[in-house]
């Protein structure tokens, strides 16, 4: 076998590259030309020809009162002959979704009435069905990757009306004097469904594309002639009439029926999620942004005054040779220059919190950026939660790096113990709370309980991916040398003079936490509503601005409070810098309790436990994020001002 010389090999490679360049260019031009047909995010559109079968899948049962999801077939509904489960991603499993096929047969373009089945109820099924109706459970179905929705008409501020979608449809309702034919407080089940399927046609593609899936649910007490015949039942309650009595949930048998209505729609396939994602008037979000900007401008003015006027004057005085003797008896932040870098108590825990805060911050930034670019569309169910968990695991490198750099600046040497603490402390606390909540879900038979296989997968992500990445980040952080400190630290600590009450830790935490929380609390209302009231949230552009404003607010308020503390000759600023802005997590938790008592109706103790547990996790994460931002801002601020002082 003969081999070409190195020079000949390069020539051959260049000729090969020259031959392939035109083909690569042609493929690139073809890709650009077909960019209009590329949909991001979500799946590619499916074209249905007339009479093609359109599959409807069942998703889950959920309630804004209990927050306990259940399997659709846990209630006495019609079942298909062969029950097939669809594989779910990690986010769907954590949301309690169990996607399966359904007995509903729908064909493109066919408007028809069908009988699904007749179900005889046992006493236990009657009790369960009635209980679910009283708990305001909603049924969730999926057609062509679109969730079933109930159409609502909302009146806008200018008097106009706009169509909006509410996720799912009600399982039933409670009777009242306002509903004809019902007895007050008795549960009635919606046993007839009207599927209103909206489709779009165009000359650019064959067939039709589904762009809307609305469901109108009715309660009808069906009657039939003679004995029930499974092959050809004869209903006497068809066609449906307003004078028909509703179907009691506490009945011996229920006949389920459905009909399909097809409506042409001008909405293009790429815009079919607009009604689902409509968040109401944008003016509220803009007001939230303006409210946050006012807080930022106020703090920016204070920081600018400190940096430009006060610090410049102080530095000029401290660096002036003529006035040095006069400053010996004065007070000020320069007098603690020999103690300002003295390591605080529990230095390893402080470094751990900084590393964890950086991990949560990086995860939040990348998650919002991906959602902003459209990679985490609601068409990809569970995608946002899956991506958030994966990003948190992969952000172990910034966590280890931030913790190790902080610990090294605090003269720490036990980097292995620090790394292990950083990799396990925050996840372990979350894991304990999550396990307790999962046991509560499992005890009630909810599909929200994480299966054993998923639990093992989460543990594997923690120990096999996150833990090694934290060690990689810590190794890189400890290996990189630190810059020279701006001042030297005395061996004997300086005595701290008595402090005023307004400089106490509780006061600074109260003041330092309220401003970052005030910058986000309006947008926080929409986030809470989307999570706990089962609404979509997809205004990630506003959320990205709010996150940016939050970071600026945390940095500025921490710098201001740190400056006041140093001026009072208190050099214990390390933990105070973290707690000042981190206390906004406490405000978040208090707000969540107020939100629960004013906006939500909790009917069971386990529901309150789930709500408080999950909000405790969210508040703890928010505490870590905002605290790390405040600490890093103060760290840079202290090094900047003391680096500008001439110390003899």
Image (spheres, rainbow, N blue to C red):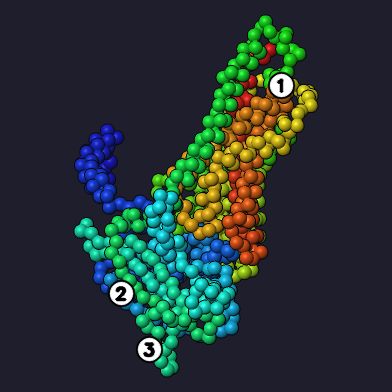
Frontmost of labels 2 and 1 is 2
Percent across and percent down for residue 289 are 49, 40
Nearer-N-terminus badge (2/1): 2
**C-alpha span from label 3 to label 1:** 92 Å
In this picture, residue 622 sits left or right of residue 530: right
Q: Secondary structure at mark 1?
A: helix
Q: Residue at x 64, y 36 (%)?
A: 512
Percent across and percent down for residue 347 are 70, 36
Q: Give above or below for 114 relative to 576.
A: below
Marks 3 and 1 close (CB-CB < 8 Å)? no
Work out which quarter of the rendered image holds the C terminus and state it.
Answer: top right
Q: Secondary structure at mark 2?
A: loop
Q: Nearer the viewer, residue 316 or 409?
A: 316
Q: Give above or below for 537 relative to 542.
A: below
Q: Nearer the viewer, residue 433 or 292?
A: 292
Q: Give above or below for 283 relative to 256.
A: above
Residue at image mark 1:
336
Marks 3 and 2 close (CB-CB < 8 Å)? no
**C-alpha span from label 2 to label 1:** 82 Å
Nearer-N-terminus badge (3/2): 2
Residue at image mark 2:
111
Work out which quarter of the rendered image holds the N terminus and state it.
Answer: top left
Q: Residue at x 27, y 33 (%)?
A: 7
Q: Residues within 10 Å of mark 3 (few under 14, many from 20)?
A: some
In this picture, residue 1 sits left or right of residue 74: left
Percent across and percent down for residue 492 are 78, 23
Residue at image mark 3:
234
Q: Residues within 10 Å of mark 1 (few under 14, many from 20)?
A: many
């Amino acid at each position: 076998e003969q081999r070409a010389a190195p020079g000949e090999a390069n020539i051959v490679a260049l000729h090969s590259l020259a031959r392939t360049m035109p083909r690569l260019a042609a493929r690139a031009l073809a890709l650009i030309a077909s960019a209009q047909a590329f949909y991001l995010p979500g799946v590619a559109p499916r074209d249905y020809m007339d009479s093609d079968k359109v599959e409807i899948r069942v998703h889950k049962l959920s309630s804004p009162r209990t927050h306990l999801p259940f399997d659709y077939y846990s209630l006495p509904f019609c079942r298909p002959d062969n029950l097939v489960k669809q594989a779910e991603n990690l986010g769907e499993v954590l949301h309690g979704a169990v996607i399966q096929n359904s007995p509903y047969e729908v064909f493109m373009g066919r408007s028809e009435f069908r009988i699904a089945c007749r179900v005889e109820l046992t006493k236990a099924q009657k009790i369960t069905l009635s209980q679910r109706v009283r708990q305001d459970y909603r049924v969730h179905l999926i057609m062509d990757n679109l969730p079933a929705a109930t159409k609502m008409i909302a009146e806008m501020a200018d008097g106009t009306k706009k169509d909006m979608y509410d996720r799912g449809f009600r399982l039933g309702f409670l009777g009242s004097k306002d509903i004809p034919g019902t007895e007050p407080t008795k549960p009635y089940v919606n046993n007839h469904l009207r599927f209103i399927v909206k489709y779009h046609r165009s000359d650019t593609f064959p067939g039709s594309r589904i762009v809307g899936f609305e469901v109108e649910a009715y309660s009808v007490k069906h009657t039939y002639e003679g004995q029930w015949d499974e092959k050809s039942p004869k209903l006497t309650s068809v066609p449906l009439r307003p004078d028909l009595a509703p179907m009691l949930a506490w009945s011996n048998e229920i006949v389920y029926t459905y009909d399909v209505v097809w409506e042409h729609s001008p909405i293009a396939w790429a815009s079919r999620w607009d009604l689902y994602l409509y968040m109401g008037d944008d003016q509220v979000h803009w007001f939230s942004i303006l409210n946050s900007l006012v807080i930022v401008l106020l703090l920016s003015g204070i920081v600018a005054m400190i940096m430009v006027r006060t610090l410049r004057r102080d530095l000029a005085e401290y660096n002036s040779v003529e006035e040095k003797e006069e400053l010996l008896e004065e007070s000020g932040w320069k007098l603690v220059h020999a103690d300002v870098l003295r390591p605080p108590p529990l230095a390893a825990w402080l470094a751990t919190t900084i590393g964890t805060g950086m991990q949560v911050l990086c995860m939040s930034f990348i998650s919002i950026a991906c959602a902003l670019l459209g990679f985490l569309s609601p068409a990809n169910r569970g995608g946002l939660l899956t991506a958030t968990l994966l990003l948190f695991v992969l952000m172990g490198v910034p966590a280890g790096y931030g913790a190790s750099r902080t610990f090294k600046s605090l003269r720490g040497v036990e980097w292995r113990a620090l790394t292990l603490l950083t990799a396990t402390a925050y996840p372990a606390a979350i894991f304990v709370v999550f396990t307790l909540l999962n046991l509560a879900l499992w005890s009630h038979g909810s599909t929200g309980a994480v299966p054993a296989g998923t639990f093992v997968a989460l543990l594997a992500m923690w120990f096999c991916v996150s833990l090694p990445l934290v060690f990689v980040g810590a190794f890189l952080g400890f290996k990189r040398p630190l810059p020279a400190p701006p001042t030297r630290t005395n061996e004997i600590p300086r005595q701290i003079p008595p402090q005023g009450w307004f400089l106490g830790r509780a006061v600074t935490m109260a003041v330092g936490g309220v401003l970052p929380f005030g910058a986000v609390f309006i947008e926080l209302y929409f986030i809470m509503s989307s999570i706990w009231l089962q609404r979509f949230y997809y205004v990630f552009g506003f959320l990205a601005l709010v996150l940016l404003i939050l970071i600026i607010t945390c940095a500025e308020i921490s710098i201001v409070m740190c400056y006041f503390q140093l001026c009072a000759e208190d050099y214990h600023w390390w933990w105070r810098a973290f707690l000042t802005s981190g206390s906004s997590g406490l405000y978040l938790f208090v707000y969540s309790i107020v939100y629960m008592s004013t906006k939500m109706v909790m009917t069971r103790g386990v529901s309150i436990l789930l709500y408080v547990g999950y909000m405790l996790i969210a508040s703890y994460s928010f505490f870590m994020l905002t605290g790390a931002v405040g600490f890093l801002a103060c760290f840079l601020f202290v090094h900047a001002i003391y680096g500008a002082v001439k110390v003899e």
